[in-house]
Image (spheres, helix red, strand yellow):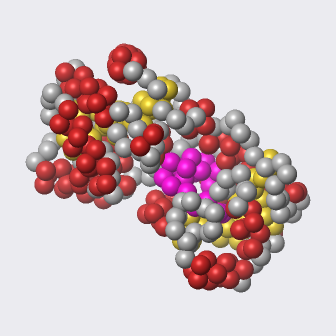
Amino acid sequence: MFLKSSIKTVLVFRALKLGDMLCFIPTLRALRNAYPNAVISLVSHSAMKSLFERFDHYIDEFITFPGFPGMPEQKVNPQEVVQFIASLQSRHFDLVLQAHGSGEISNSLVSLFNAKKIAGFYRQGGFCPYPEFFTSYPEQKSEVHRCLLLLEKLKIKNLGDQLEFPLKVMDEEQLENELMIMGVTLARNAYYCLHPGASTESKRWPSSSFAKIADYLIERGFKVVFTGSYHESELVRKIRKEMKHDAIDTASLNLPLGPLASLIKNGRGVICNDTGVSHLAAALKKKSLVIFTETDPDRWAPVDKKLHQWLLKPDIFGVISKIDQMEAA
């Protein structure tokens, strides 16, 4: 085992999207605590740059990942990949942490970085570039606790599994400006955020079901705010047409992450599919109900089971029952 004092530069590889990256924050927190004077660099998806600008207390440098053959998260430009690998090789990092998954492809990639030490996950029988610091990939853990297991071989102290999302004053100001343009006023704790989108259609609860839940909340006296990105605005329009009452559409605003987080923080709660917004609500410590249709709740449901509820392939009455429980708590 190498001494912690010998680690001056750390490179973390995790090129995934919002929910996956928020689940990784507890691991970054522990990593920074273990190596307070090291330069910690993160290689990740370009869409995550704005997220990690909020975590400069954990990350010193953000490096955009250009993709790699066999990894589905983004398109690959071969010339950029070659330049990317050559650039990292020249830096001779003291430690590379492969946190991108079980390692079938990512272990081969990080082994090209020319680091002094590599740690990460591997599957039995798969390529393991540095056995002393690699951990067998756990299949049954929550994603948060799965990531924290990476630290055990490095003898790094776990500082807890709570997620984080630092809000800024400008987030609230930008949200207020957007709502003012829409002519919308939202009292704090008086509305629910409904997020009907997801990365794939198979992960989405039916639009007609979201419409009925939105109507139910409005009839209980709450406002309903639909959230989402611009490409989900058509889905929101469809749901609103199916409703008996009127709801607020912020998907068409394509709110940046900060104002979206402020919107969620100021609301009463979140009802969403298994998507990044679920983990954002968890990071903001805002109660939520997560609807699962195909993914594994044991892996992806928020860790705090008191504040965050989940249902697998529910009907309308199951969701209404959970909402009533959330309100009674």
Q: Quarter of the image holding residue 304?
A: top right
Q: Residue at x 14, y 44 (%)?
A: 184
Residue extending furthest left?
183
x, y percentage for residue 44?
Answer: 56, 64
In the picture, measured across the screen, residue 326 lies left or right of residue 215, that is right
* Residue 207 against residue 64 in the figure, above or below: above
Foreground of the two, 2 or 278: 278
Foreground of the two, 216 or 305: 216
The count of marks equals 0
x, y percentage for residue 179?
Answer: 18, 50
Position of the N terminus by quadrant: bottom right
Magenta residues (range): 12-28
Q: Residue at x 88, y 57 (%)?
A: 132
Q: Residue at x 53, y 44 (%)?
A: 163
Position of the C terminus by quadrant: top left
x, y percentage for residue 53?
Answer: 47, 64
